[in-house]
Every structure is written in C-alpha cells, then in structure tokens.
Amino acid sequence: MAQDLNAPQYAKWGSTLEEKQQNILNSNFLKESCDNRDYDAAARYLNALIKSCPEASSAIYQRGAIVYKNKINRAKSLAEKNAYVDSLMLMYDLRAKYFGDNPKQGTAYILDRKAREYVIYRPSDRAGIRKLFREAIDAGGENVDPETVALYFGNLCEDYKTTDEVTPDEVISEYDRLTPIFENNPDAIESKNQFDAAFGLSGAASCDNLEELFRKKLEANPDDEATLAQAVSLMSRANCDGEFFFTTAEKYYNAHPTSETALSLAQGFQAKGEYDKAIKYLNEALATETDNIEREKLLVRISLVDLVAANYSGAAAAARQLRELNPENGLSYFVLAQCYAASAAACDGIAGQATFWAAYDTMSQAVNLLQDSPEYLENAKTALASYRNHFPTSEECFFNELQPGARYTVTCGTAAGVVTTVRTR
C-alpha cells in the first residue's frame, strides 16, 4: 500500500509533497550509505536533511554521529579531525534541540552521550570535559547515571592533580554534592567505588584542606547548619582528629544529635585517649539506636573502650547487655572474663582467687565463640593459662573447706553472684 504523505505524521518531512518524497528518499539513502560505509555520500544526504527537515526524525542525528565518528577516525590532519569533532558535537546539540523531549532518550541521555564522546575525541580540553559532564549531570537530575557521575568526578580529580584549573574546594564541594546520587543507587557499587577512590587519591580531602575550607565558612556564618553538617561528614570520612574537627562536630551534635555523629565523636575521642568523652557519645548513640545489629556493634565498642579505660564495672555492664542481645557474640565473654579477673585484687583471700574460676569459665566460652576472630582468639587463649595459674592450691582449698568439683558462688568483685566450680592449680 502506498504511503499517504499528506498524513499528519509526515508533516515534518516537508511543506510540499515533492519535498516530503525527496527528504524521505534522502533519509533512506543516508541509512544505506551508513550501512555500506560510504560516509562521504552519507554526509551529503545528512546535510541535505538537516537543511530541509531538521525535525523529521532523531535517526538523522544518530546516523550523523556515526558518520562523523568514522570521519574523525579517518582524518588526515589535526585541523580536519577537529572540524569533524565539532560536527559530531553539533549532531548532539541538534538532537537535543529538536528531540530533547523524547521520554526515553531526551536531553539528559543526549548530553550524557555528548560528554562521553567529548572526553574521547577532545581529551586535552579539560575545562570543556568538565563543563559537558556537569551539563549532563544537571540534566539527569535524580535519574542521572551513576557511571556518568563517576566519570565526571574522576576527570575532575585528575585535573586537580595535574593542572591548576581545579581547587581543592571544588573537589570537596562536588564530592559532597554528588554523594547522595550513590546513596540513592545502592546497586551502583562499581561506580561508587570509582567515585570514592578518585576522591581518596586526589589528595584534595586532606584534613588541612578541609579545615582551611570550613574554618573560613564557619567564621563567616558560625551557626549555618548545612555547613556544619557538610564539615562533619567530610572530616569524619577523612578521619580528622584535630581540635577544629571536635569543636565543629560537638557544635553540630548539640544542634542535631544523631547516632552517626556521636559515633564519629566517640571514635575521635577514643583515638585521643579521652575515654570518658568517647563513652559519653557511645552511650548517647546507643540510647537513640533501635536497630539490634547496630546496638550490638555499639555495645561491643562501649565494653572494649571501658575495658581499656579500666572502668571494669562499666565494661562488665555493657558486656552483659551484649550477651543478652546476642549470646553468640564471643566478645561479651572476652570482656566479662577480663573484668572478673581485674577485680580479684580488691578481694581478700580465697574470695579473690575464686574470681579466677569465673574468669576462666567465661574466657573458655569466649575461646569457643571467637574461632573466626584471630585478633582476639590468641589473647583469649593466653588469658586462660594466666587465670589457671591464679587458682588456689589444694592446701588452700582444704584450709577453706572447699572440695574440688563443688559448686561455688563468687562473693566479691564484678563476678559477685556468678556460680562456678571449685578447682585447684
């Protein structure tokens, strides 16, 4: 059946029947020329179509891109190549102009393709590369491809390292601005890894750079919550531990107490040996945390920090909570056993020696549960041998009327109330 070129769908192919016929014919010739790799002929049909009916079909510009990419690869001089690159970019510009509202391959998609082509064919135009990628990302909005973001940011970081065109402020600001894109696309793991690696290797996110940047901003507007939040987030990622970080983080935490910020503060104060402050923030984080997996992690940290700080009652209390939450977590027994043993010195005679029975029993459970944790397992085994050496002798048990194998309730120290078994060295 012959096509009715007067139908509405053919209106964009020309204003007269003859124009429509010729333009549709040229479109077919363009396709055939591309299929036959006759790109000189294809270019003639392409130019005729752009001049006569630029809004007729997006295929004109898709094939135009094919034509000019092949011409770029066959160019005999730099000037000729540059001219073809300009023509290739024009194909994307015209496609965006006339078909930017396409629901599947609209402006965002077209600008994305343009930026990717530009970095291939104009790799030395660093400012141009950054500009086109930013335009593509802005056009994509919430639906931008995470891979595009990673490509852009990788180029930005490379330019920071190799040119004087990019400042550390710009790298830091862009990292913070673009990070939510990956948070909203949890499956984009590879692109997220590339994004984070580029930031880490750039050198822009040093604590000195971050402090210089945010000190200026906060001096100008000390109570700006957005700036405080950004400063705490970026400095936490960079593991900053200077006074400026702690002052800023505490100020932000006082305004917006969150588990995440409390953990950052606790980690910093722990590294500085300020265990009281570390425990304060860990307990505040625990008070607001409802997820049991996260609560378990917090209780582990609280018990270990209190243990290092020689706050044995606090460590034991946290370890017991941990044991109640997850009886299979060997660290609860690891900490409790050490708390029991540490309290023995405060107990007289056989009462002090008896705490080592409880410590030995508890550390034995830790050894059984820490088989997959070599960083703790060897210490646990060493502690077992040490605790056995503190058991009373046969004579000491005899004089205290204690029979080996009998049940015994510890009466002193952090192990008070624990039921154990009488044993000798």
Image: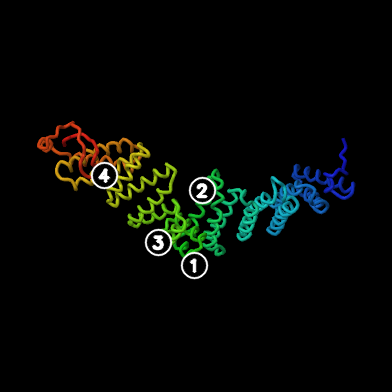
Instruction: Find numbered disc 3 in the image and state the secondary structure of the residue it sits on.
Output: loop
> What number is the disc on residue 338?
4
Q: Residue placed at 33% from the left, 47% from the top? A: 303
- Horizontal side of 420 relative to 95 (left or right) equals left
The residue wearing badge 3 is 242
Q: Earlier in the sequence, mark 3 or mark 2?
A: 2
Q: Earlier in the sequence, mark 1 or mark 3?
A: 1
Q: Quadrant of residue 138?
A: bottom right
Amino acid type of disc 3? Gly
Amino acid type of disc 2? Asn
Residue 402 in picture, x, y percent from top left: 14, 34
Nearer the observer, disc 4 or disc 2?
A: 4
Picture layout, residue 143 above or below residue 423: below
Residue 161 in view (yes/no): no
Q: Residue placed at 39% from the left, 51% from the top? A: 284
Residue 392 in picture, x, y percent from top left: 15, 39
Q: Earlier in the sequence, mark 4 or mark 2?
A: 2
Nearer the observer, disc 3 or disc 2?
A: 3
Disc 1 to disc 3, C-alpha distance? 16 Å
Amino acid type of disc 4? Gln
The residue wearing badge 1 is 216
Which of 312 and 231 lies nearest the eye of the viewer?
312
**Callout 1: few (<14), some (14-19), or many (20+) C-alpha neighbours within 10 Å?**
few
Residue 248 in picture, x, y percent from top left: 44, 61
Q: What is the total number of numbered labels drawn onto the structure image?
A: 4
